[in-house]
Amino acid sequence: MNSKDRNHIVVVEAYEGFIEYLSDEPEERKSLQGLGLPVEEIAERLDCRITILCWDQWYHYEQKETWVPIPATRPVSQPDFSNPSEAFKSPMVRRVPIPTRDPDYCLPFDEKGLSPRSYGLIYDSGLLFFASYCLNKELQAFYNKDPFHVAILPMWGGVGYVTQMARATQVPDMIDVPFVVMVTDKSVNCQMANQEGLWTRHAIIRRQMEDVSLALADLALVFGPRGKEIAAEGRLPDASAPVCAPRFVDIALLEKVANASAQFTHSNNPVEFFLYEPQQAASGVLATLDAVTLLANNGVHLNRPVISAGPSMTFAPMKPREFTDYWSSRGAVRELVRERQWEWRKEYPRLDQVFPVRLYPSFFDHLPNIWAELARGSLVLLSPAAAEGLAPGEILPQEVLIQGDPSPEKVADCLKKIAGTDIKKLDQIRRELCSRVVEAHREKRRGLFIEETREALGRLLQSRPKPQDLSRIALMFFDRRVPLSVLAQEDRPPPLPKPRPGTRKGTLSVVVTCYEMGSMINEAVRSVWDAERQPDEVLLVDDGSHGGETLENIRELERYASKNNLPLKVIRQRNRGLSSARNAGLEAANGEFISFLDGDDIIEPQFYQIGLRILEKYPRLGGVAAWAFIFGAEIPDGFWNAHQPEFPFLFIEDSIIVPCLTRTELLRDLGGYDIRQRYNYEDWELGIRMLVSGWPIVTVPMHLLKYRVRRNSLYRSMTDVQNQVMRELLLNTHRETVSKFAVEIAMQLENQWKRHVCSHATSSIPAQNQNCDISFRKIFSKAIRRLLMRLSTNRKDASLV
């Protein structure tokens, strides 16, 4: 069979560069390729081609173009990601790099650097959101060149988020193939252990990307019980059950493990505990350090120091200090070093004349190559995260397992037991562990898991499953602290208000508000008429304009509409403010659905068609929003790639653009716009009220609005005092819901305040490519300072950078 005639599966690797550092050891990184899946075995069983898309070329740019200046746990020295060893030899499997191409310029990073829009997106939403945005474009190009039938994406980092949301919302040029998500772990477990802060903007967006990616997947693959639990909690109750796949392990390495199971260790060798991991809390280094401290405080003295070796990392809470430097300065740790209970090293330790016990007390599953350590003759101590996928279907010796999360108390208890066990017994446990690991990967036992994986992927290749219910997935946005499975089981949908008598099904009203917009109102209304799905009714609410230019443009629109039989009704009223103008349009509207547009903005042709299709398919949804382009005076063009509106983050910033399409009667039932809210708070408050009332909103990952920033706009003319007054009104209006999320809201506000007071440390960017315009850097710096001084409100200005 010609290779092009075979089914084609694409596997996208997780982003694991400088900002997501796991290891630069060749064997470790080899085990990470292909998401740790046995892709060659899968390709053979399915008789299909598999293309692995990797981020190798991106890592070179992390300290230059794609740098993100936020507190994070990172290597002190630039890791060496060059010349990765290839794990695959099959002609049916190939591994190719994802191009480093700016989505705005459509040129490689090296040729022109990144566009102002791209810099703004990275600063605003994080590197992984930018990577997800770029990946969607590259997958579209790759699909057009070499179509594929299934895509396997990593949950870790959520880089498949944009592509999956594009499919879920059926935007043009979306990739309509089944998506599989490989579940290893959640980034929140790593962030918590590293004390990086859970309620920073980038962390919140990343968690949302991961969770939405998992929930939208047609199939979840896991490596063990930990992954199954994560998948079950993060998916709808009626979603397909996760499938347990075996991890890739080199046959030659497995033979070495088998040989190690037959070798005996000299009984006179003393036990040597050691870690060889990136020196960070998430790897379990801090838990082990605390465990040794507990033992010392309880009078337990180890015969040899516990060695902590591995690459130096920054310690996020004390940035820019190194992890080892910070903890070495603590009195208790200095005492442990003096008493030879603890030792810091850089390189992998020499283990001559000792019985080595390597510790893997990690808090997250990073696919460690434990087989290589077993092949060296070491015993291992494993957290549940580290043990995932090591020996599927086999019960490992209890002596090598930390029961539950690796707290200092549990690690100390394990160290004490191992240190007090006879070497012969420990060697027996080691050999038994090696035997069980080898047995788990023997052809017959491993074949069961391979066959289950083959069958699950084969079903997706044969027929496309029914997509996941987007409206039920959106339930997660009501409370991001609660698993989706729980929210879905407890969901009691509010009754859908019935349209007024005589309302024609599927009809759409668009309300355009205007106050002294001049010729801009002409652009706004004409953009509505140019929509692919033209509204059935266009209501232009003139909120007391007196300027000749504005009035003449409105008269011109009326003449043009009459001549060309276009929908337009002008409602004139005394100036009463934006909320009153919108409410006037709401009261007059006759359509089943309604959308609003400010008179200085421009709607893209596809928005109404996409939004209506989603709301008609998912009546449980309250509204549909989208991304926006930013343009205007004195600013570079930008874009607003808003995340999904969710609680509690929606109380910190607005993430819903004005034209949010909803049901007319639902908006009336909610009371319309609150006339007390001003300066763009009216949009913000209404979005909050919709979620509080049990109606989720989804954001389409496509730029469907051109949002104009004017020098004299309501938002830009607002003072800090006015902003404070409006925020207090907003929070007091929803005091009951705010109190429910009091701790999380306080943490997010504190993070914004910290960004403000530390703006001198976070607003700088590294030297850019020489082709990058100097003037942009000045604009970028000024825009960031303005953003940080605001501390609040509408995210529309957040992407001006």
Image (cartoon, rainbow, N blue to C red):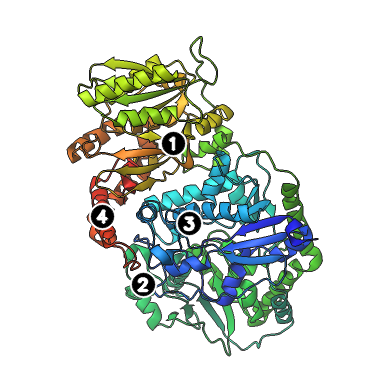
- Point out the residue furthest to the front here: 563
Q: What is the three-letter code of the residue carrying label 4?
A: Ile
Q: Nearer the viewer, residue 392 or 787?
A: 787
Q: Nearer the viewer, mark 1 or mark 2?
A: 1
Q: CA distance from mark 1 to mark 4?
A: 27 Å
Q: Which residue is under mark 4?
A: 779
232 vs 314, left or right, is: right
Residue 295 placement (x, y as % from top left)? 46, 72
Secondary structure type for disc 1: loop
Q: Which residue is under mark 1?
A: 604
Residue 340 placement (x, y as % from top left)? 43, 83
Secondary structure type for disc 4: helix
Q: Nearer the viewer, mark 2 or mark 3?
A: 3
Q: What is the three-letter code of the residue carrying label 3?
A: Ala
Q: What is the three-letter code of the residue carrying label 2?
A: Glu
Q: Which residue is under mark 3?
A: 131
Q: Earlier in the sequence, mark 1 or mark 4?
A: 1
Q: CA distance from mark 3 to mark 4?
A: 24 Å
Is the Cβ of the residue at disc 3 closer than 8 Å to that at disc 4?
Answer: no
Residue 433 placement (x, y as % from top left)? 69, 72
Is the Cβ of the residue at disc 2 closer than 8 Å to that at disc 3?
Answer: no
